[in-house]
Amino acid sequence: MSENHEAIRDARELGLPKILMLGLQHMFAMFGATILVPLLVSKYFGGEGISIQVTLMCAGLGTLLFHVCTKFKVPAFLGSSFAYLGGFETISRLTAGKYADMPMNEKAAYACGGIMVAGLMYLVLALIIKMVGVKRVMKFLPPVVTGPIIICIGLSLAPSAIGNASTNWPLALIALCVVIVFNIWGKGMFKIVPILMGVVISYVAALLMHSAGMTNADGSAIFDFASVAKASAIGFPPFALCKFDLTAILVMAPIAIATMMEHIGDISAISATVGENFIEDPGLNKTLLGDGLATALAGLVGGPANTTYGENTGVLELSHVYDPMVVRIAACFAVVLSFFPKVAGLIGTMPSAIIGGISFILYGMISAIGVRNVVENKVDFTQSRNLIIAAVILVCGLGFSEGITFTVGSTSITLTSLAIAALAGVLLNAFLPGNEYEFGKNPQGDISRGIGMNPQNSNRKKN
């Protein structure tokens, strides 16, 4: 393959052992961020809330459900969404009315009910797109909007990478260097699993450092295996059915407006990376349907909302293996892992610095894709409207690090920075004069955004 680093669209040519390794790579890429959500939610609810086992199960099943809805064409992994953390925190602090003396685990159940409703809102937008057509919707998402949004997706994650890496810079640099070395100088299979190699080698290095008595920057131990010792070897995920209340729904459901905008940006990024027209085939309505159903399912059984994961988009760009089957294998690994609390806990001991070091590459790749999209689509920044749109998107996406929180009635609602950026870009593009973009009019110009058919791919399919 990969001596010339050509894209691999059918992973079967690599053989089963290599396919399994690629699946593990995708699972490790999503693991750190995915389990962080239930850990944070548990802090809000005093140790109650969402189980890591349930989270892994929902991520795996949600990804598989997404692939079914998208006709097995889109190589996307669905992990835990951070956008709803503000909603969880708000509900955990509710003390009025029925919430006055409510146990924390019951509050969490009502929060998950709100997530289920939020997931169903995706289906409404999917139906609208199905009825009016994707071309009318994409008129509001020209390259001058989607390019900067994709840039923001990567750059907005940069503080997370730095924060994790700063816990132990030597370890983070080991992870980063291993990924670079295997991606640039690796041979054969090692060239397409640089993330997995980065995780394995840096984890071994962390064990050696821990054994030698070295600590993190704050003096804490590099590893803490206490939770692993307490965890059982085998255990069924502790599902908890959600409950419904209008207050919780009004807190959680409006966040779907933000995450749906992020979804469109993520699908554009995945499409641009792979060079396929996922906006049109299988269709934005089907990707929204898959994401919405996955989120609704997660909320139903007490899990966090799902979302397409930028980490895995970075893996696609780095490995050049675009076969969705590999992502489905990663999803199956996540499902299996949810039945083994001790193994899940062991992987969860992965030092934050390793995640940070690897994230340097993954998050940067996403922003680089956005830059490439703007350049290849030849967005004319001598035009004031384009300059204004891009400028506002970038400032909103990077400036509102804490989002914007406002109150409707007695309910607090938070819009994430990416949602603010997307909404601002779409509105400016709609109302500023000079919007001459028409989806499908210039297929070659749409290719690099992943929303125009790639002639090379089309020819490949015909042969």
Image (cartoon, rainbow, N blue to C red):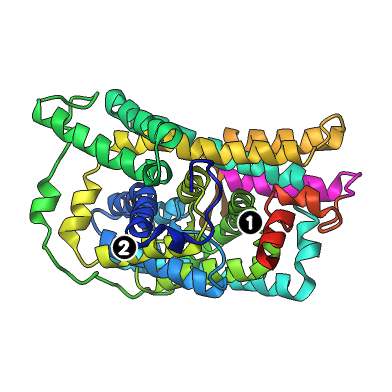
Q: Which mark is residue 182?
A: none
Relative depth, front residue between 442 and 408? 442
Tell me: 39 left or right of 381.
left
Relative horizontal placement of residue 429, taking residue 364 as reference (left or right): right
Which residue has dot 1 on it?
A: 264
Alpha carbon separation for disc pair 1 and 2: 27 Å
The kind of residue tagged 1 is Ile
Picture disc at residue 333: 2
The residue located at (49%, 62%) in the rendering is: 324
Residue 428 is inside the magenta segment = yes
Where does the image place residue 388, in percent across and percent down from the top left? 79, 34
Side (left or right) of 43 relative to 30? left
The residue sitting at 14% across, 41% down in the picture is: 224
Q: Residue 240, percent across and down?
A: 30, 72
For the residue carrying disc 2, how many other residues have a C-alpha within 10 Å: few (<14), some (14-19), or many (20+)? some
* Camera sees residue 166: no
Is 341 located above or below residue 4 in the figure? below
Label 2, secondary structure: give it: helix
Residue 148, placed above or below residue 26 = above
The magenta span reads 417-436
In the displayed structure, would residue 124 be above or below residue 452? Answer: below
Amino acid type at image mark 2: Phe
- Left or right placement of residue 452 versus residue 192 in this view: right
Where is residue 3 drawn, in percent x and y? 49, 41
SS for callout 1: helix
Question: Which residue shows up at 74% across the image and 39% down it?
Answer: 376
> Which is more toward the observer, 453 or 33?
453
Mark count: 2
Please check the rendered image and state whether residue 136 is part of the magenta-colored stretch, yes or no. no
Q: Is the magenta stretch mostly helix, strand or loop?
A: helix
